[in-house]
Structure formats: structure tokens, C-alpha cells
Image: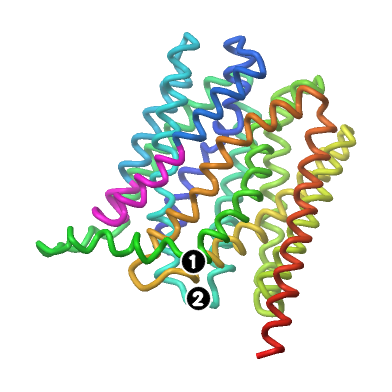
Amino acid sequence: MRSIVVIRVVNRLGGFGMAFLGLRLARDLGLDLAGVGTVLGVFGACTIASRVLGGVLATRLGPRPTIVIGLLATASAQLVIGLGQSLATVVAGVVALGLAYEIIEPASQGLIAEHVPAERHTSAFALLWAALSVAGVLSGLLAALLSQWGVGALFVADAASSALAAGAALAWLPSPAPTDPAAHDRTATPWRSAVTAPLVRWTAIATLHATVVMVVVFMLPLAVELAGLRPATTGWLLATAAAAAIAAQPVVRRLEQQAGPGTLLVGGHLVLAAGLALWATGSGGGLFAGAGLEGASGSVLLGSYQATAARMARPGGASAVMAVFGLSWGVATVAAPVIGASLLERHTSVLWLTCAVASLGLAVLHGAITARRDVRARAA
């Protein structure tokens, strides 16, 4: 697990480009909000194919080749976005980035699911989130510094970090084990066993949460811009959220032992709703306080959602399960730009209050699911 965490951290050091895709299209290339929403929606559709491709490659080739391929493809697309001079070139880069962006996820998440005991899955995924948040603090600071050379510079730096991460994966991850001639016939088995009714239901619920998260990712820089603040402010907000995610880790580890996943999900969504409501105030203090709550909630929610999905995997099927579950993020990435742009056109407060209400609704949903499960347990 240590190797995959380091690789993801190296990649995350330049991971600020995703948050600035909308700004690259709108401010640098003059695309209107509706056009930005359309392009980012296409990006999201491509990430769905990317996630499936990542699962297939992880099943057939193993984690190391899959992760290296995904990172190098991502780096290439980021260079096109960062160095492109025309709208058509940058849009082509965005499409290519979508097709590469999720390739590494099933392999890296599958490694954690298969090599960490099930009772520690929540804290293990939260630990990965914390490690990424450490890099995220530096990433936010780098974004604040590099933004003075333009948004394109952020994508060039992001490409460099992806290439470095690919080198680390090639050096540190174990080579795939040799396969026997019948291996090809067995590769479909993990996919058949992965697509179960409980996983499909859980993925549908997670899609609602992922949509809120992706609205934040895509719309925060644009909301900051519309508020008359410098783009560097977004970098500082991202750094604040990442620092809060780090600080929340001891709490997550304690709660994992003391509370069930349902309780963690209810609490995490309440904290997220409070942070988004603070953003709706539009004040500087509200923005930074809300960023802290948004970052802290991310550790709880991401770890809990992924851990619940990972526990549904059969031996050898973790990559396939995480690929199916990860489609929630692909669907969310399609929906979020369209939803977010529509809400942002009304007002920034409308955007953040709508997201806060959605998070409150998910807290109520998880509370109801947990209560129903407890009633069944007592009846048994």
C-alpha cells in the first residue's frame, strides 16, 4: 500500500489542473458558461469510458502496466490543454484527458481493497485521502503561485507530476505475475461477480454525493472569479480544504472503531452541508471556514463510500468492483458541469445552497438506511 500512496501523492502534487478546466475554457479562450458546461459534460462522459478501460486493463494486464499507461496518457493530454493556443486544440485535449483520467483508479483502489483487512478499509481509504491531501496542500500553494503565469501553466505542471508518478510506478510497483493460457477465459469472471444488485444500489447513492463533489471541483474557480476575487484565492481555498482533511484523520480512525458506516456518512454529509452553506454567504471568512468543513467531510465520506463498496468484492475481484463503483464519478462528472453552470448563472449563493440541501438530503437518506438496517438486525 505504501508504494501506491507515494505514487498517488506524486501525481497529486500537480493535481490542481482539474479544478481550472472551466477557467481555462472561459477566461483564456472566451467560451461562455453554457459552452463550458457542455465541454466539461463531454469530459465527464469520457471518464466513464476511461474507468471501464482502467478496470479491463487492470484485470488483464495487472496494476503496474495499467497505472503507468494511465499516468502517461494523462500527462500527454494535460500538455495539450496547457500549451494549446486554440479552442479546438484545448477541447481536444479535454476529451483526451477524460479518456485517460480514470484509468489508474480501479487498479490503485483494487490494490488497497485486496491488501488491507476489511475492518480497516474505511481508515485505509481515508489514509489515502489524507496522503493526497498532504500533496493537496502543496498543490494548492503551487496553484496560487503558478497562476501568475496563466492557467495554462498549471496544466503543464500537472503533466510533469503525472509523468513523474508514472516513473515511480514503473520503478516501485511489482511486475504482473505470468498468466497461463486459460487466463483470458477467466477475465470475464470478476466482472460477472462484481455487478450485483447491492453494488448497483450503492453506486447510485454514491453518484448523488459524487455529483455534489464535482460541482464543487468544477464551479469553485468560476464562482471565485465571479465574486471578483483573484484566481489565486481558489488555490488558497484548496489548500485550506486539504489541510482540514489531514487534521480530520485521527477522528476518522477513532470513529471507524466506535461507529458504523451509516453514522459516519450521516455526520460527514451534515458537515459538508454546513461548509457549503458558509460558502453561500459570499464572505471571505465564510469561504475559508466552509473550505475547512468541506475538506474535513471529504475524508469521512470518501473513505466510507469506498470502504463499503470494497467489502462487496470477492477474492480477486476488487479491481472490477471498484471500476463499477467508480462509474458514479463518471456519471457525476457528466452531470455536474451542466447542473453547476445552470445554478451559477442564477447566483453563487443559489449554487452553494442547492449543493448544501443535496448533502442534507443524503444525510437523511443514510440515516433512514441505517435505521432500517438496525430494525432488521434486532428482529433477527
- Looking at the rendered structure, the kind of residue marked 1 is Ala
Residue 135 in the image: x percent, y percent?
A: 56, 47
Q: Are marks 1 and 2 in contact (CB under 8 Å)?
A: yes
Residue marked by disc 1: 310
Specify the quadrant of the image occupied by residue 237: top right
Residue depicted at 71% across the width and 76% down the height: 259
Mark 2 or mark 1, which is nearer the start of the sequence?
A: 2
- Crowd rating for badge 1 (residues with CA inside 10 Å; few <14, some 14–19, many 20+): many
- Crowd rating for badge 2 (residues with CA inside 10 Å; few <14, some 14–19, many 20+): some
Residue 161 in the image: x percent, y percent?
A: 44, 37
Which quadrant, please, contains the N terminus?
Answer: bottom left
Residue marked by disc 2: 118
Residue depicted at 57% across the width and 61% down the height: 202
Question: Please, what secondary structure does the residue beneath circle 2 have?
Answer: helix
In the image, residue 294 above or below residue 201: above
Query: Is 65 one of the magenta-colored residues?
Result: yes
Question: Please, what secondary structure does the residue beneath circle 1 have?
Answer: helix
